[in-house]
Image (cartoon, rainbow, N blue to C red):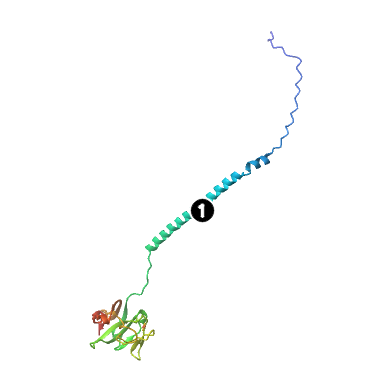
Amino acid sequence: MAEPNLPETDTNPAPPAAVAPPAPPKPVTPAKPVAAAKKAVEPTRRNFLVSSGLTTVLALFGSWFAVAWTTFTLSMLGMVLGTVRFMFPNVLTEPPSSFKAGDWTNFEDNKVDDKFKEVGAWIIRGKDDSGRDIIYALSTTCTHLGCTPNWLESEKKFKCPCHGSGFKITGINFEGPAPRPLERYAIRRSEDGQIVVDKSRKFQKELEQWNDPDSYVLV
Ligand code: FES
């Protein structure tokens, strides 16, 4: 059997090529970054002036802007609070102007009931100008300058401690600087016999208002 034609092989192979030793690393050149960086960072006089001027402008503008906004916010807050305050006005807790003074039979003739002085009234059973038996309520406010007189049972008179004005049991002034009688309050007898005083209505003798039947209760 014939052998195939094979290419001729070199029986003397060439010696391996010599491997060159690795080149030594290049020495690193020391940089001069510090000086360069310094140069880059160091502000020039011009830069300094520009940046400081800009900073000043920003600071001023910023502060005025902040002041304006703060003022505006406070104003708006005040308006809101004012509106809320308007929606909830003061509530005055005043005592009721009307009160019940008890059964009419509790009042003795020619006597002053001092129990209601704290609420501003004396309840009295006495006689009117025509001699009729009546119950009436006198205000405890002196008609001179508004002090509160005292009832002196032994002397049968109201005496004001401020300037000495005196009032009879009827309320008519007779001594001191008081220019006119004490005032009466509206009074009525309810269906169950209770005496009801209404301080919201007043009657003055000098105006002939004591003739009004609402200013007394006939007994
Ligand atoms: Fe009553 Fe002056 S206030 S006498």
Residue furthest bottom in the image: 154
Element at badge 1?
helix
Q: Nearer the viewer, residue 138 or 109?
A: 138
Q: Is residue 159 left or right of residue 71?
A: left
Image coordinates of residue 204 in percent, x first then y, are: 28, 80
Q: On the image, which quarter does residue 9 sit in?
A: top right
Image point 53% across, 51% down: which residue? 59
Tell me the quadrant of ligand 1.
bottom left
Image coordinates of residue 102 in percent, x first then y, are: 31, 82
Q: Nearer the viewer, residue 46 or 153?
A: 46
Label 1: few (<14), some (14–19) or many (≥20) C-alpha neighbours in 10 Å: few
Q: On the image, which quarter does residue 217 sit in?
A: bottom left
Image point 47% across, 54% down: which residue? 68
In the displayed structure, 33 sits above or below 12; it is below
Image coordinates of residue 133 in percent, x first then y, are: 25, 87
Q: Nearer the viewer, residue 104 or 122?
A: 122
In the displayed structure, 36 sits above or below 106; it is above
Image point 35% across, 79% down: which residue? 119
What amino acid is labelled 1 in the image? Ser
Q: On the image, which quarter does residue 200 sit in?
A: bottom left
Q: Quadrant of the C terminus?
A: bottom left
Image coordinates of residue 45 in percent, x first then y, are: 61, 45
Q: Is residue 217 left or right of residue 66?
A: left
Identify the residue position indicated by label 1 in the image.
63
